[in-house]
């Protein structure tokens, strides 16, 4: 192994992560500061394209910038770009890192969630806090998944007010004041219904934003007009109600993807 250090850590993930962050990483960082060669790195979080497409988009950057290495990994449903820059000085290494980041941003644009390693739900949380805004959610096919992921963010109680899992039509009418006639005429999975859901959860909680999902999770229940994987989404605010529909191949992983698709839409220019 020459002059390389070897570390042996336990295989249990949470134990390994704690030991690595508490003991191994500080040693490696100290060594890096003492070396003549300086190494810096950062993570860019992406969503909305395949890992192969992401790799093809950025694979030539190390050839453009000498001293830069780039890797990608899937952290479903996000994709992470890891950029490493090496130089004889910390200043030059950071300059290379910024150049590589700028190229990634210019090429990937709308697919970038964060250049600081934050998840989509963290970005949404920061936006809500910046606006001093609050959020209430009505979920049907996602079954509370959105609320679960939103509350994984520390401090989410500052902006996240309430979530209602209104799976049955009766719950949509009783809790969200969705019109029985709307459901009978258009169905639970429809633009009209999900708009009323978003408005109902917002009004009930006096929230800045009311968000709603309704869909066909399968495996049965789909039709040619509304196939399995159809997800209707709406956001209600002082500016009105915005609506979007997407179609996915459903399952637990696809539900998570639909949640993030939904959050990405909320934070885009299309939101209210």
Image: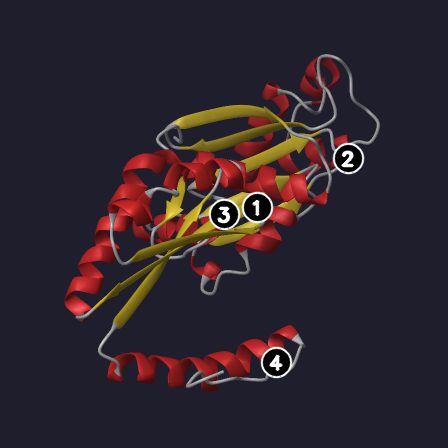
Left or right of residue 192: residue 135: left
Residue at the spot 69% in from the left edge and 33% down from the top edge: 172
Q: Give the answer, above or below, for where 22 lies relative to 209.
A: below
Which residue has dot 2 on it? 168
Label 4–label 2 contact, CB within 8 A? no
Q: Is mark 1 on a helix, strand or loop?
A: loop
Label 2–label 1 contact, CB within 8 A? no
Whole-angstrom CA distance, mark 2 to mark 1, is 28 Å
Local packing at callout 3 (Cα closer than 10 Å; few below 14, some 14-19, many 20+) is many
- Examine the rendering and report whether any part of residue 202 can be seen: no
Mark 2 or 3, nearer chain start: 3
Which residue has dot 4 on it? 15
Mark 4 or 2, nearer chain start: 4
Q: Position of residue 228 (x, y in %)?
A: 74, 26
Q: Where is residue 72 in the image (x, y as percent from the top left)?
A: 47, 51
Whole-angstrom CA distance, mark 4 to mark 1, is 24 Å
Local packing at callout 4 (Cα closer than 10 Å; few below 14, some 14-19, many 20+) is few
Whole-angstrom CA distance, mark 2 to mark 3, is 34 Å
Residue at the spot 26% in from the left edge and 45% down from the top edge: 64
Please tell me the numbered disc located at residue 79. 3
Please tell me the numbered disc located at residue 231. none
Q: Which residue lies furthest to the front in this view?
A: 2
Which residue has dot 1 on it? 77
- How does the figure colour the protein chain or chains? secondary structure
Q: Give the answer, above or below, for where 226 lies relative to 128.
A: above
Residue at the spot 35% in from the left edge and 53% down from the top edge: 129
**Marks 1 and 3: which is nearer the front?**
3
- Nearer to the camera, 210 or 266: 266
**Marks 2 and 1: which is nearer the front?**
1
Q: Is mark 4 on a helix, strand or loop?
A: helix
**Marks 2 and 3: which is nearer the front?**
3
- Examine the rendering and report whether any part of residue 186 can be seen: yes
């Amino acid at each position: 192994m020459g002059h390389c250090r070897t570390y042996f850590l336990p295989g249990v993930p949470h134990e390994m992560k704690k030991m690595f962050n508490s003991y191994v990483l500080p040693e490696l960082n100290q060594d890096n500061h003492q070396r003549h060669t300086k190494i810096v790195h950062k993570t860019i979080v992406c969503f909305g394209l395949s890992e192969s497409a992401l790799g093809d988009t950025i694979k030539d950057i190390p050839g453009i910038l000498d001293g830069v290495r780039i890797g990608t990994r899937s952290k479903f449903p996000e994709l992470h770009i890891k950029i490493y820059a090496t130089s004889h000085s910390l200043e030059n290494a950071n300059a290379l890192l910024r150049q590589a980041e700028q190229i990634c941003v210019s090429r990937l644009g709308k697919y970038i969630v964060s250049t600081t390693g934050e998840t989509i739900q963290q970005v949404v949380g920061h936006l809500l806090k910046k606006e001093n805004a609050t959020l209430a959610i009505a979920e049907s096919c996602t079954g509370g998944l959105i609320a679960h992921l939103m509350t994984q963010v520390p401090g989410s109680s500052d902006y996240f007010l309430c979530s209602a899992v209104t799976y049955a039509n009766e719950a949509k009418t009783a809790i969200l004041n969705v019109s029985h006639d709307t459901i009978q005429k258009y169905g639970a999975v429809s633009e009209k219904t999900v708009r009323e859901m978003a408005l109902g959860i917002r009004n009930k909680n006096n929230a800045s934003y009311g968000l709603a999902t309704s869909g066909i999770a399968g495996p049965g229940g789909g039709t040619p007009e509304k196939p399995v994987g159809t997800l209707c989404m709406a956001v209600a605010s002082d500016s009105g109600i915005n609506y979007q529909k997407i179609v996915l191949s459903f399952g637990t992983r696809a539900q998570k993807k639909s949640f993030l698709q939904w959050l990405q839409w909320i934070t885009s220019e299309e939101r209210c």
